[in-house]
Image (tube, rainbow, N blue to C red):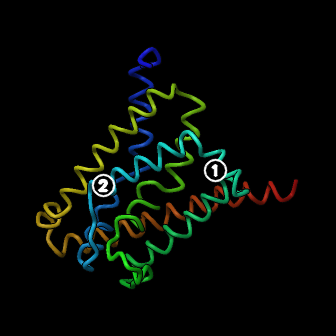
Amino acid sequence: MFMGFDLQELVSAFIVLFAVIDIIGSIPIIINLKQRGKGVNAMKATVISFLLLLGFFYAGDMMLKLFHVDIASFAVAGAFVIFLMSLEMLLDIEIFKNQGPIKEATLVPLVFPLLAGAGAFTTLLSLRAEYASFNIILALILNMVWVYFVVKMTDRVERFLGKGGIYIIRKFFGIILLAISVRLFTANITLLMEALNK
């Protein structure tokens, strides 16, 4: 298993996944969820995200084919969810009303689409074509360790920045999320249109 280890591949895969998962950019969302009284379990979020990403890494193509869904359609669906989340942050409204029996936000929206979203799934499938599986899995594990510590320490970040700082950051990242959703949507809707025209 260690035969495929390559430090350069590991670092490259880590950086790509770090940018896509972007847990730092999710801090205002996590703090916002906590302020609204929704529990966020750092360990649970990390473990479920890792298992989902690992499962998708090995069985992603097969799972999507099973439901007759392609990566582009999956990414467009993820773009809509991210778009709605950005509207929540920018307009100070609540779209994701958690009316189910589980009054926490660990699964939605933290695990999906923030940590294990369409972007991360698509990236893993892309990396698999370029790098050895061992290096990608190791990069994913290192990213998940980082995710756990960031989610665990959001309260300290909140105390450090204060309410005013959090509000400004929330608005800024709302615009960033909006831009990401638009990019995800436009990049993948064109692929869908091309596939329909064939």
Return the x and y of residue 88 as percentages of the image width and height. 41, 78
- Residue 185 relative to residue 50: left or right: right
Q: Closer to the N terminus: mark 1 or mark 2?
A: 2
Q: Is residue 38 above or below residue 74?
A: below
- Residue 155 relative to residue 97: left or right: left
The image quarter in which residue 125 lies? top right
Tally the numbered discs: 2
Q: Which mark is residue 183?
A: none
The quarter in which the N terminus is drawn is top left
SS for dot 2? loop
Which amino acid is tagged 2? Ile
> Distance of mark 1 from mark 2, alpha carbons?
30 Å
- Residue 87 relative to residue 152: left or right: right
Q: Nearer the viewer, residue 177 or 3?
A: 3
Return the x and y of residue 82 as percentages of the image width and height. 49, 67
Q: What residue sits 60% from the left and 31% below the top?
A: 129
Q: What residue sits 47% from the left and 18% below the top?
A: 4
Which amino acid is tagged 1? Met
Q: What residue sits 43% from the left and 31% below the top?
A: 12
Return the x and y of residue 116 as percentages of the image width and height. 45, 54
Q: What residue sits 86% from the left and 58% below the top?
A: 197
Question: Which one is in front in this view, the residue at disc 1 or the one at disc 2?
Answer: 1
Taking the view exactly as shown, the residue that stands out farthest to the front is 101
Which residue does the numbered mark 2 point to in the structure image? 24
Q: Which mark is residue 63?
A: 1
The image quarter in which residue 145 lies? top left
SS for dot 1? helix
Return the x and y of residue 20 as percentages of the image width and height. 44, 49
Q: Nearer the viewer, residue 111 or 80?
A: 111
Q: Nearer the viewer, residue 20 or 143?
A: 143
